[in-house]
Amino acid sequence: MDADELLAVFPAVPSSVPTARRWACQQLILRGVDDSTAQAAALLVSELATNAVLHTRSARFTVCLDAADDIEIGVLDHD
């Protein structure tokens, strides 16, 4: 993991989706990403997190953000 990569683990329950979305948006804004881009990235996080919650038997999911040059987003389930 490099200095620009951020990770957060959330329980795989529906109420974690908005929490993950807010976390992603806040982290990107803290790193200088403009608000509209951070909001768009957070929307992608919520879509991917929803898939992890609804379509796996995992107890948790991890959100990975990398804002070094471009924004890279990953949501990993543990199933």
Image (cartoon, grey):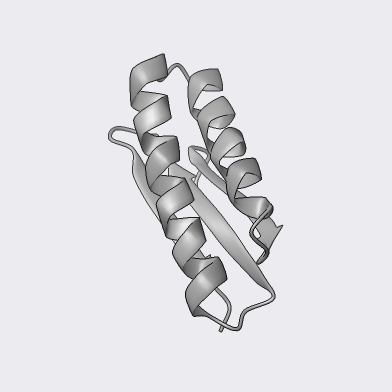
Residue 36 shows in the view:
yes
Is residue 7 shown left or right of residue 75? Answer: right
Is residue 41 shown left or right of residue 69? Answer: right
Q: Is residue 45 above or below residue 27?
A: below
Query: Between 28 and 3, which is closer to the camera in this rendering?
Result: 28
Horizontal and vertical percent position of residue 1: 52, 53
Residue 8 shows in the view:
no
Query: Between 54 and 10, which is closer to the camera in this rendering?
Result: 54
* Residue at screen point 40% across, 20% down: 33
* Residue at screen point 35% across, 19% down: 36
* Residue at screen point 47% across, 48% down: 46
Residue 37, picture quadrant: top left
* Residue at screen point 58% across, 60% down: 62
Marks counted in the figure total 0
Is residue 12 shown left or right of residue 24? Answer: right
Horizontal and vertical percent position of residue 51: 45, 66
Quadrant into which the C terminus falls: bottom right
Horizontal and vertical percent position of residue 67: 40, 35
